[in-house]
Amino acid sequence: MLLLKRRIKRLILSMSVSPLLYLIAFGYAMGKSVRFGGHTYLEFLIPGLVAMSSMTQSFAIATDINVARFYWHIFEEFQAAPIGNVAYVAGEVLAGMSRALISVTVILTLGMLFGVRLHCLNPLFWLAVALNSFVFASLAVALAMLVKSHADQSLLTSFVITPMAFLGGTFFPVDRLPHWAGQIIWILPLTHASKAIRQAAFGNLPGLSPYLFVGLTGIIFFTMALKCVDQARD
């Protein structure tokens, strides 16, 4: 929280750039001419941006972990201190989730400036955001313990996070894809998170299955993170 307090202005500015570009580029280009399920493309896009940003920002905690490990050697201090694996992983995951929630608030604020009104006070909306952030923050901790260099982390982001950001139902409906592609994309946790976030933002009941899928995935990744931290301590 102390680090966040010092960086909050820079974080908010950096978190505003990409969503603003997407809203300008896609919003003005297709905002009123394209409609999905009775909603304008801007209304469809913003929940997708929320899902994507909560994923990328929570996963970005891996970069901070790698810098701390490879350059500042802070992880060695954690090893020497009486801090358990659960406390360390939970702290890093909560840090990633905090970044994600800030980015979501930024996107919703930008959406209001563009005249988009969604059901953002819906508890199911924030539950889906929190679960999505939990999944990718936990995955970030696990992968950050496995990589051997900062360059390896960038490679993982390029091959795992970037494809998921564009194919997880963020910018277009998954059912518009060929059947075989839809089956593959349906395995991705972001696809289910996007569905739940969008349905809740539209004031609909998302159903239980997306929350169960994302929640169970988060528990699996959190357990993986615990094991990876334990191995890294050795």
Image (cartoon, grey):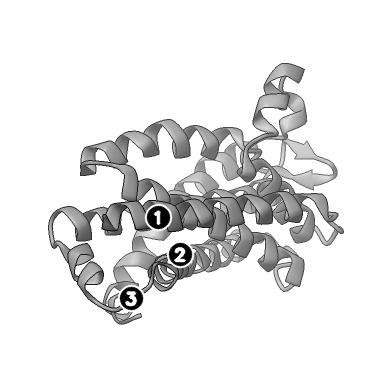
* Residue type pointed to by label 1: Val
Tell me how far mark 3 sits from mark 2, CA to CA. 15 Å
Pick the front one: 139 or 10:
139
Tell me how far mark 1 sits from mark 2, CA to CA. 7 Å
Q: Position of residue 87 (x, y in %)?
A: 42, 73
Q: Is residue 66 visible?
A: yes
**Helix, strand or loop at mark 3:** loop
**185 over 192 or under it: above or below:** above
Q: Would you call the spot at circle 1 few (<14 residues within 10 Å), some (14-19), or many (20 or more)?
A: many
Residues at discs 3 and 1 in contact (Cβ within 8 Å): no
On-image quarter of the N terminus: bottom left
Residues at discs 1 and 2 in contact (Cβ within 8 Å): yes
Marks 1 and 2, the one that precedes in the sequence: 2
* Residue type pointed to by label 2: Val
Query: Which circle marks residue 93 in the picture?
Result: 2
Q: Would you call the spot at circle 2 few (<14 residues within 10 Å), some (14-19), or many (20 or more)?
A: many
Which quadrant would residue 133 be assigned to in this image? bottom right
Q: Is residue 57 visible?
A: no
| Label 3 vs label 2, nearer the camera | 3
Question: Residue at image x 85%, y 54%?
Answer: 207
Query: Which circle marks residue 88 in the picture?
Result: none
Q: Position of residue 18 (x, y in %)?
A: 43, 49
Pick the front one: 136 or 198:
136
Q: Position of residue 196 (x, y in %)?
A: 74, 53
Pick the front one: 167 or 40:
167
Marks 3 and 1, the one that precedes in the sequence: 3
Marks 3 and 2, the one that precedes in the sequence: 3
Circle 1 residue: 141
Q: Position of residue 182 (x, y in %)?
A: 71, 26
On-image quarter of the C terminus: bottom left
Pick the front one: 200 or 119:
200
Circle 3 residue: 83
